[in-house]
Image (cartoon, helix red, strand yellow):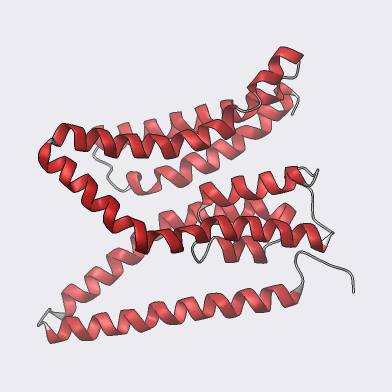
Amino acid sequence: MEFSVNSPILFVIVGAIIALVLAQSIFFLVRAVKRAKELGISGTTVKKTISSAAVFTIAPAVAVLVGVVALSKSLGVALPWLRLSVIGSITYETVAAGNALEAAGLNAGTTLTDPSIFVTVAWVMTVGIAAGLVFVPFVTKKLQSGLSKIGMKDKRWGEIFNNAMFLGMISAFLGYVFCDVGLVLKGDTSGLIPVCVMVVSAIVMAVCGLISMKAKVRWLQDYALPLSLVIGMASAIPFNMLLGG
């Protein structure tokens, strides 16, 4: 049987896994509502909390949908749907998939027809993100307690350490953005495309932040990420045409 990234069996397997995750969510939601009643919290407050939380999940869901669409050309819909619906991260999954495809000698937009490459990409996307499940229970508590001790001794140094950890994480992705800039010296300007897309996304994010603060449009803060993702991806089209990607 010919392999397809959109094979019905893949959707059946992925659907079963996501159904299990949804069942867990419903289970804990029901338990939480029961516990709220035991604590004497009014039904109006519980409903308002649930509805508010549901509304604020729309923005992250849009960002995830963008990631699924971006990966669906090469990997089909089922695998990105699974990876970005359970413990996946759009910033990690897209980079991991792109690196795996590049290692296999394929472009990010190439539809996979070789099942071995598909499995390799799936393993790269899964194993890397799953490391967090292993390290978090053993490392997070010690790390947080260490940062707390530093913050109690010197609040300034505590903030510096927190900011340094965040910048370290961002730097890993910046390396992926700037890794091909050197191609410009060889006459190939395609290495500037990721940089230009990043700049556009950053501008959109900054504009959303300014509007939300100056015009008091607070809801825009929740949609700044998906807006910057969508507009950044759209800007990649003219940049590809202009810079010869």
Q: Report which quarter residue 204 is drawn in.
A: top left
Q: Nearer the viewer, residue 64 or 168?
A: 168
135 to 38, vertically: above or below: above
Establish if 129 lies above or below 163. below
26 to the left or right of 101: left
Q: Residue 220: which quarter of the image?
A: top left
Q: Position of residue 211 (x, y in %)?
A: 31, 34
- Residue 29 in the image, given as x and y percentages of width and height: 32, 79
Question: Residue at point 31% right, 65% down?
Answer: 53
Please tell me how many numbered marks the rendered image carries. 0
For the N terminus, the image quarter is bottom right
Residue 184 horizontal side relative to residue 15, left or right: right
Could you tell whether 155 is left or right of 230 in the image? left
Residue pictured at 52% horizontal, 42% vertical: 229
Residue 16 quadrant: bottom right
Task: Determine whether 123 is above or below 217 in the image.
Answer: below
Between 30 and 97, the residue placed more toward the observer is: 97
Q: Determine the residue positioned at 27% across, 36% down.
A: 161
Spot occupied by residue 188 in the image (x, y as percentages of width and height): 75, 19
Q: Residue 7's x, y, as percent?
A: 77, 71
